Image: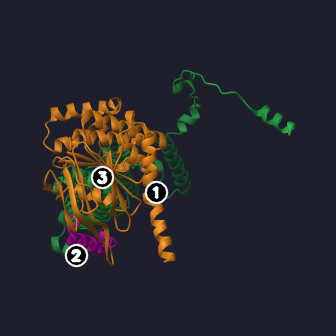
Amino acid sequence: MVDRSARLHAFERPDYLREPEPALPDRHFATRLSPWRRLTSVTAVRQVTLLVLLAAAWQLYGAWLGNDLVLPDFAKTAAAFWHGIIDGPLLLRAWTSIRVLFLGYAIAIVLAAAVSLLAVASRVGNDVLALFTAMFNPLPAIALLPLALLWFGLGEKSVIFVLVHAVLWPLALNTHTGFLGVSQTLRMTGKSFGLKGPRYALLLLVPAAFPSILTGLKIGWAFAWRTLIAAELVFGVSAGSGGLGWYIYENRNQLEIANVFAGLLAVILIGLAMESVVFRAIERITVRRWGMQT
Amino acid sequence: MPGSAPVPVTRLPQPLLRLSGVTIQYASEQRLVTAVQNVGFEVFSGDRFVLLGPSGCGKSTLLKAVGGFLQPAQGEILLDGAPVSHPGPDRIMVFQEFDQLLPWKTVHGNIVFPLCQNGVGRGEALERAARQLERVGLTKFAEHYPHQLSGGMKQRVAIARALALEPRILLMDEPFASLDAMSRQRMQEELLRLWEELGLTLLFVTHSIDEAVLVGSRILLLAPHPGRVRGELNVPPAPGGRAGEAQHALARRIHGLLFDEPQDERERAAHG
């Protein structure tokens, strides 16, 4: 008994109070990362390194293979790309593709906005959107090209029709999903501000659903780009001034395989630029800044 | 009810908000569910009127009906004598959820936006936003986005935004329930300070007896399934916003009313 109380006393400590020591700025404790760590923490640096390695492997394999009709090496492809830009039609071809693409993309955005707004405004609209996306989303847009050629003839109109189809459904589906995901609290907040009809949709639903809409825009862009190149491959044969797909097809026919690779490179570069420059920038100034995407 | 109600000694002024015989039903997949049954109460200007009850007593449903988000199946809801038919800026709601702020607008933008949507001039809106931000102590955070704020700060912004709209009545749906205990206590005290400074009228929903006694001046007790009136109690004023013996006694009494009695009834039913 005596023993136990003595032990308890031994652990008893007095209270104390004091002013907390002054807070130091965060940088006081910051540890410096090594230059290597800092360099490799930049995504772009790592990706460029990977690309360089890939190009080197390509160069080595191409040189070892020694058959330009099957696989021209990286240096030859790069040279063909450079010549294609400087004194060849590559830029013009790329511009033709991009112009048609943006035309189709813009029309599809307008239509998708209209369709998804109708879908939130009424039950019939909702049913129509659900049915149409279920029907058309799994259908590859390029499968409509033969029909489009029949309806609109050889030319831009047919390609634009197919492009609109490629973008419209995934974009409308994502937009609509985004609208449905807007929280009840946010909806009620908007309504209590007196927002109604188009103002409610544009000032509340659209920004609140923007992460979803942006995803739809990105998916739509990717679908459109590959659909366009495929469409140009199919009927570029008879078109006067084709796009990149036609450039690829034409050069294959003339067995200018380095140019074929240059055309493919252009397709990849444009897709990459759109993804990592344009969409990245939009993300940075919207959903990332708003904390709606981490 | 008329038999048990005490005869008013003095004539009361015209109530700001009056609900009479309100029944609210939800249509679920299979059947109609009655959430609130024949509820009536009156809120006067300057009241801190609390709707208190366990979950399922329809207190949030009642608040949404006052907000104009739900239409009662029966009865009427009158604000300044005019029936409530749709949501509007004269009855701004502060929710429990933090996502009531528009994530794509800064703190400042969140306050200015509804003002501009309701015909307040740009200059006046900016001035009101600055004033309310100062009042809730967030002037330094005006250019921050909501996701950069703590839960307590978000609720302050929501309150500042509501105050800037100068509503007739402020509807609060468990606004501090998602906060940690310390922030909650600070916000309750701040709300009382704002009420005193601005002469607000509050309609406050909570399931916390302590909060009801601390925040409220009059408490409507609701019984659950469906929500029905159990009684209406006055809260003795607490000087300095600190709960004393009178408040604790009231809290115990309410606890007894809400939790003990139904059990007795069940026991009686079991024995009888």
Secondary structure beneath dot 3 equals helix
Q: Examine the structure image and report whether residue A128 is included in the region drawn in magenta.
A: yes
Q: Nearer the viewer, mark 2 or mark 1?
A: 1
For the residue pair B83 and B1, the one nearer the viewer reads as B1
Q: Which chain is green?
A: A
Expressed as whole percent of the image width and height from the top left, the position of residue B93 reads 28, 49
What residue did someone put label 2 on?
A147
Give the amino acid type for the residue marked by disc 2 in the picture. Leu
Expressed as whole percent of the image width and height from the top left, the position of residue A175 reads 29, 60
| Numbered circles on residues, count | 3
A195 vs B141, left or right, is left
In the picture, residue A180 is in which quadrant? bottom left
Rounded to the nearest angstrom, the CA distance separating label 3 from label 2 is: 38 Å
Q: Which chain is orange?
A: B
For the residue pair B98 and A251, the one nearer the viewer reads as B98
Give the amino acid type for the residue marked by disc 3 in the picture. Ala
x 54%, y 57%: residue = A65
A34 vs A241, left or right, is right
Q: Examine the structure image and report whether residue A196 is included in the region drawn in magenta.
A: no
Rounded to the nearest angstrom, the CA distance separating label 3 from label 1 is: 45 Å
What residue did someone put label 3 on?
A208
Give the amino acid type for the residue marked by disc 1 in the picture. Gly
Tell me whether marks 2 and 1 sit on the same chain. Answer: no
x 22%, y 51%: residue = B8
Q: Which mark is residue B256?
A: 1
Q: Nearer the viewer, mark 3 or mark 1?
A: 1
Query: The disc numbered 1 marks a residue on which chain?
Result: B
